[in-house]
Amino acid sequence: MIRKKFKLLFLLMIVLSTASCNQGPRPLEVTIHQDHLCVFTNNSKTYYGLDNTFLIYLGRIDYNKGFKSTYEKLYTSTPLPIDEKNCVAIPLNEIKHNVAYEIILDTNKSFHTSICVVGKDNKLEVRYVEPGKSTCD
């Protein structure tokens, strides 16, 4: 009986520790600077991945098909994009207006956001797409 309780307690501790460690992707911030998107974590606890690298990639949101990257770039020994002054630049010509995109930044953690670039009053702006949506409505 005591052995069963210890087994159950041990199993419960493993499940809880695994669940608490898996927090999922963290949010990204995106702004527009002249001819590019400026992407950053706004999280001081951002650290490099393997070999002082991080990867940024994006693709259209289409839940009927699997994710397909339309742009990706690996950065080596570059300042981490923690704040807007050290942001990662994604050229605006890589993005179609009024199309929903998922942007992912992989460091030691994964950060992501879903956005659209829309024109408003002859000015471009970033709109965040609601989770589960695939349009810029």
Image (cartoon, grey):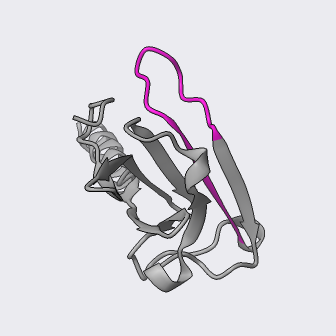
The residue drawn where x is 21% and y is 34% is 137
In the rendered image of this protein, does residue 45 appear above or below residue 63?
A: below
What residue is at 59 percent from the left and 66 percent from the top? Answer: 89
Residue 69: in magenta span:
yes
Question: Is residue 93 shown left or right of residue 103?
Answer: right
- Please give left or right for residue 41 compared with residue 107 in the image: left
Residue at left offset 39%, top offset 76%: 43
Total number of numbered labels?
0
Q: Pinpoint residue 30: horizontal percent, then vertical percent.
A: 40, 63
Could you tell me residue 52's position as x and y percent? 73, 74
106 inside magenta stretch: no
Along the viewing direction, whichever of 36 and 106 lies nearer the viewer: 36
Residue shown at 49% from the left, 75% from the top: 46
40 over 17 or under it: above or below: below
Residue extent of the magenta highlight: 53-70
Residue 95: tell me if it is visible: yes
User: Which residue is nearer to you in this view: 126 or 66?
Assistant: 126
